[in-house]
């Protein structure tokens, strides 16, 4: 386990890839909204981008406090559950789980958009491309955290370098008059720009902040001292993200870039700066790669959060199981399958997925800040007032953005209000099942002792064979109360069986049941119910099912599956023990 822990540089690659990659579409989302008021309104992207930077600063400070307050990880779920109660914690946890699924879907779709911008002929195959990348990420993460970090580190840092090269080159070209774009001047009056439109654009730009919480969720993945390393990684991520985001926003404004459904904003800036040469294709290739690999943040955080919910009995226990490579394999596989379904349903359309994705993050953002506020007022440690003010500002800001999303993009996000209650209901039903199971399994070690009863064994047979002979021999070694049951379909068949049984005389009574409708299961179940009703007070009822096992797997399908059907029906019988006697064929 210690060998799977991450250094700061590797953790930055694994846990920051989502946040860093969002600069590829954050500015674009602002411009898409502003274009509704005409090209003259694009200058508003600069003050909006500055406001997004301010929010990023607040979130980094807030989550840094969360890291030191809750070094065991879990982020918004643990903070909300501890300070605001279990229902609020489940709302935060459910929102994050949904958000991580959306992260994979959005990242793979956005990465596909970067590829189709460079190669428009691939536009019709974007769903297939996205699905292939999800499959690749799932397999890579099943191989272990350290291996995935080693694979991710190179493209993440290449992306950071390439974006800074693009920004620096773009600024130099603009400064020396290499760009002659008719960009509207800052402060230009635009008659049809409303506060509603500006708020909508701001909320869209905040999609660049998704993934900021991932570091606080995954503190246990860091090498010791884990909380200090996590806090430093968070600050590194915030600094790099802020610089890249404002740089892309400034270049988009200076270059007069307008959003294009078939070409991303980053693609247009790179094209204007370098032309469609080698550097352009390198930037587009690395951008596509980082957008695909951004999904890896979710692959690190989703299984860990699912583990914590499973530990609290709100999710199936299979999410607590580690695979051969010490990763939570079931969480990784479920994340891959669910995100692939989303890509198929939304046909890889990034613009339709991003509002869902962003709202899913701002709900836990808000609840986490509120939980930290409650914590400071309860504990009141030294200097708590400053910490309280930071979290209060963070909570009010993220709450405002969440409400903006609800009011400005309700047609895009309405399904969250249906899906989240269903997820929380499933959490409660899962916990209720585990609680009821524990109550029924619990015993009093002083008072509750094993009850010794006899045993009546029922052996269903289809004829007199080697497997029947050995089954009856085994049954008689356990108890003298053995009865064989045969189901016949006509008088001649029944008469032959009875005569053959008398000739064989194995020392076991044969009960013959007649089935008028050629059903074996129904009369057998009726007989077993009768035996159970008569003898369950004094005896255990065991149904010993003879079954031969074929030498090769394909031979199994050549035989009827009556024994499997009988077992399936008997599982619902409360007082019946099901046992199988295997007879192995060697040819």
Image (spheres, rainbow, N blue to C red):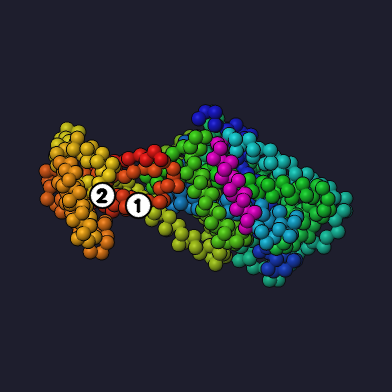
From the top left corner, tell me how far across and down residue 67 is, in percent: 52, 38
Measured in 3D between alpha carbons, the distance from the residue under mark 2 to the one under mark 1, in whole angstroms, is 16 Å
Locate residue 459 relative to residue 5 in the image: left or right. left
Q: What residue is shown with label 2? A: 463
Mark 1 lies on a secondary structure that is loop
Q: Nearer the viewer, residue 439 or 141?
A: 141
Q: Say which residue appears at 38% left-offset and 56% top-offset.
A: 425
Image-quadrant location for residue 522: bottom left
Mark 2 lies on a secondary structure that is loop
Q: What residue is shown with label 1? A: 561
- Numbered label tally: 2
Quadrant the C terminus occupies: top left
Asked whether the viewer can see residue 132, the reply is: yes
Q: Say which residue appears at 24% left-offset and 60% top-offset.
A: 489
- Residue 274, which numbered label? none
Q: Write the start and end of the magenta stretch as one range.
A: 127-145
Q: Residues within 10 Å of mark 2 (few under 14, many from 20)?
A: some
Image-quadrant location for residue 47: bottom right
Q: Nearer the viewer, residue 15 or 371?
A: 15
Please tell me which of labels 2 and 1 falls first in the chain: 2
Which of labels 2 and 1 is toward the front?
A: 2
* Name of the residue lying farthest toward the bottom: 192
Locate residue 309 relative to residue 299 in the image: left or right. left
Q: Say which residue appears at 23% left-offset and 37% top-offset.
A: 474
Decide whether the magenta segment is chiefly helix, strand or loop: helix
Is residue 321 within the magenta segment? no
From the top left corner, tell me how far across and down residue 153 is, in percent: 66, 37
Is residue 136 within the magenta segment? yes
């Amino acid at each position: 386990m210690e060998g799977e822990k991450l250094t700061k540089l590797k953790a930055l690659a694994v846990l920051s890839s989502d946040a860093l990659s969002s600069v590829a579409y954050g500015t674009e989302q602002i411009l898409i909204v502003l274009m509704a008021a005409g090209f003259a309104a694009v200058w508003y992207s600069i003050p909006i981008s500055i406001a997004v930077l301010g929010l990023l600063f607040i979130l980094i400070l807030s989550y840094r406090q969360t890291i030191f307050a809750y070094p065991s990880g879990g982020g918004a779920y643990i903070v909300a559950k501890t300070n605001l109660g279990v229902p609020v914690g489940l709302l935060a946890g459910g929102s994050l789980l949904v958000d991580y699924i959306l992260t994979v879907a959005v990242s793979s779709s956005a990465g596909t958009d970067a590829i189709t911008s460079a190669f428009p002929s691939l536009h019709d195959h974007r769903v297939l491309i996205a699905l292939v990348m999800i499959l690749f990420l799932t397999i890579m993460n099943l191989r272990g955290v350290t291996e995935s970090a080693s694979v991710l580190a190179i493209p993440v840092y290449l992306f950071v370098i390439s974006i800074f090269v693009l920004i620096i080159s773009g600024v130099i070209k603009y400064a020396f008059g290499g760009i002659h774009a008719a960009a509207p001047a800052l402060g230009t009056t635009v008659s049809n720009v409303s506060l509603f439109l500006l708020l909508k654009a701001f909320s869209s730009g905040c999609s660049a902040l998704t993934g900021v919480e991932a570091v606080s969720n995954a503190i246990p993945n860091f090498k010791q001292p884990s909380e200090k390393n996590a806090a430093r990684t968070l600050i590194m991520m915030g600094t790099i993200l802020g610089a890249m985001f404002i740089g892309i926003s400034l270049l988009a404004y200076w270059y007069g870039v307008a959003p294009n459904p078939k070409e991303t904003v980053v693609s247009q800036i790179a094209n204007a700066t370098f032309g469609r040469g080698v550097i352009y294709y390198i930037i587009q290739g690395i951008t596509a790669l980082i957008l695909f690999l951004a999904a890896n943040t979710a692959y690190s955080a989703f299984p860990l959060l699912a583990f914590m919910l499973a530990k609290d009995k709100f999710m199936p226990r299979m999410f607590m199981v580690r695979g051969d490579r010490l990763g939570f394999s079931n969480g990784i596989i479920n994340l891959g399958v669910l995100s692939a379904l989303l890509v198929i349903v939304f046909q890889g359309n990034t613009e339709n997925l991003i509002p869902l994705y962003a709202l899913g993050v701002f709900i836990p953002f808000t609840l986490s800040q509120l939980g930290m506020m409650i914590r400071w007022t309860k504990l009141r440690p030294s200097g708590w007032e400053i910490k309280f003010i930071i979290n209060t500002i963070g909570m009010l800001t993220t709450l405002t953005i969440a409400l903006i999303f609800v009011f400005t993009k309700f047609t895009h996000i309405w399904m969250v209000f249906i899906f989240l209650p269903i997820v929380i209901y499933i959490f409660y039903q899962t916990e209720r099942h585990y609680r009821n199971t524990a109550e029924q399994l619990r015993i009093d070690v002083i008072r509750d002792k094993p009850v010794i009863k006899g045993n009546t064994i029922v052996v269903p047979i289809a004829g007199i064979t080697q497997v029947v002979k050995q089954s009856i021999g085994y049954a008689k070694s356990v108890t003298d109360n053995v009865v064989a049951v045969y189901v016949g379909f006509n008088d001649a068949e029944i008469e032959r069986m009875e005569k053959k049984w008398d000739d064989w005389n194995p020392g076991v009574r044969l009960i013959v049941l007649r089935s008028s409708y050629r059903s074996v299961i129904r009369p057998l179940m009726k007989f077993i119910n009768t035996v159970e009703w008569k003898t369950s007070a004094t005896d255990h009822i065991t149904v010993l099912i003879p079954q031969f096992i074929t030498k090769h797997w394909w031979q199994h399908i050549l035989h009827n599956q009556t024994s499997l059907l009988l077992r399936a029906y008997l599982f619902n019988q409360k007082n019946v023990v099901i046992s199988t006697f295997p007879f192995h064929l060697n040819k």
